Image: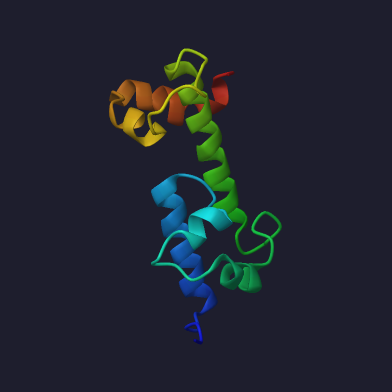
Amino acid sequence: MTEKKYTEEELYQMLWEKAEKIEKVPGAREINSDPELPSYEVFTDCFGSFRKSIRLKNLVAKFSELQMKNKCYCHDCCDQDEKKCEKDVLECKAELTDYEHWLYFELFDKIIC
């Protein structure tokens, strides 16, 4: 079976949407487990290494930073034992007030974890 051919722009858009959904740069596991996406190999054939790709520079920067913010929030939320927490950070973030969201996700650079 032949996989559908995608343009670079289509692949970029799919990758961006997946990153927004999971709030991090998607890896092989996240991509290959999503039936709506082509295989991880299709993406790497187009872009090469995600972290080294010039085309994916903004995507990697934005979602790597968001992942760091999520980890910082999770660390504080779970009283420093986030490994035992079974909640998804997205569920916890949905409970944030506007002020809390602002502290963690807009003032993050001034907060030291």
Which residue is found at the position 53% from the left and 46% from the top?
Answer: 62
Q: Is residue 106 visible?
A: no
Q: Is residue 17 visible?
A: yes
Picture quadrant where residue 93 is located: top left
Q: Residue at 57% of width from left, 57% of height from top?
A: 28
Spot the residue most to the right: 52
Residue 1 as seen in the image, left or right of residue 60:
left
Q: Is residue 5 left or right of residue 100?
A: right
Residue 37 drawn above or below residue 99: below
Q: Which residue, as the protein is rendered here, is positioned at the far bottom?
A: 2
Q: Looking at the image, which residue is at 54% across and 75% down?
A: 8
Q: Report x, y in % for residue 27.
A: 57, 54
Choose top left, top right, bottom left or bottom right for residue 50.
Answer: bottom right
Image point 59% across, 51% down: which residue? 60
Q: Nearer the viewer, residue 52 or 90?
A: 90
Image quadrant occupied by the C terminus: top right
Looking at the picture, tell me which residue is in the foreground, 60 or 75: 75
Name the residue furthest front: 1
Q: Is residue 10 above or below residue 95?
A: below
Above/below status of 70 relative to 24:
above
Q: Position of residue 85 (x, y in %)?
A: 43, 23
Image side of residue 92 versus residue 5, left or right: left
Residue 55 pos. (x, y %): 62, 64
Colour pattern = rainbow
Q: How many marks?
A: 0
- The spot of residue 97 in percent (x, y) is 28, 23
> Between residues 36 and 103, which one lies in front from this camera angle?
36
